[in-house]
């Protein structure tokens, strides 16, 4: 049986504004909060890791691109409907934020670099609009579409 997996790259939209407006300590807490929300929303067999800065890499095993798009669209929507709350100088502060997500499914002949590149390109597409999931497929002719 052929095993499939999808690499997802996800990052927090407008994160610099959170850091600038609330400070780096709160920005770090937002990253922790996002990682918890994302980690809690995937299966135990999936892997969520901080890739760098405010970006996460998710490895969704035994999953195809269509299923991953559906599942992660729910995650993206869930994050957008939640808030990170903390006590600030002026009392209770609430930060609402969104995430964008790029997906690529492993194809025969892919290297890790090719897979990461496709997921990154899909994330770049998602960041153009924000708060959405985009994917990049590998065509049978070797190019991207």
Image (spheres, rainbow, N blue to C red):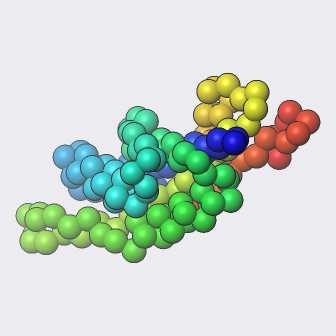
> Is residue 132 something that shows in the picture?
no
Q: Is 123 on the left-hand or right-hand side of 96?
A: right
- Residue drawn at x 43%, y 55% is 43
- Residue drawn at x 60%, y 56% is 68
How far from the left and from the top, in percent, is residue 104?
66, 44
The number of numbered discs placed on residues in the rendered structure image is 0
> Is residue 65 something that shows in the picture?
yes
How far from the left and from the top, in percent, is residue 130?
55, 60
| Residue 129, quarter of the rendered image | bottom right
| Residue 5, quarter of the rendered image | top right
How far from the left and from the top, in percent, is residue 14?
44, 55
- Residue 55 vs 115, above or below: the answer is below
- Residue drawn at x 20%, y 67% is 85
Q: Is 15 on the left-hand or right-hand side of 65?
A: left
How far from the left and from the top, in percent, is residue 115?
65, 34
Q: Is 76 on the left-hand or right-hand side of 126?
A: left
4 or 31: which is nearer to us? 4
- Residue drawn at x 9%, y 71% is 91
Which residue is the extreme one toward the right? 141
Quadrant of the rendering where the N terminus is positioned: top right
């Amino acid at each position: 049986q052929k095993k499939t997996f999808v690499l997802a790259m996800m990052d927090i939209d407008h994160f610099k504004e959170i850091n600038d407006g609330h400070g780096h300590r709160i920005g770090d807490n937002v990253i922790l909060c996002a990682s918890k929300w994302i980690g809690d929303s995937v299966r135990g067999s999936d892997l969520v890791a901080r890739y760098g800065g405010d970006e996460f890499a998710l490895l969704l095993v035994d999953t195809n691109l269509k299923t991953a798009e559906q599942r992660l669209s729910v995650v993206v929507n869930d994050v957008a409907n939640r808030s990170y709350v903390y006590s600030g100088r002026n009392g209770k502060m609430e930060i609402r934020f969104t995430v964008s997500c790029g997906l690529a499914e492993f194809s025969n002949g892919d290297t890790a670099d090719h897979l990461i590149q496709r997921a990154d390109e899909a994330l770049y597409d998602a960041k153009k609009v924000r708060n959405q999931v985009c994917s990049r497929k590998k065509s049978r002719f070797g190019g991207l579409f």
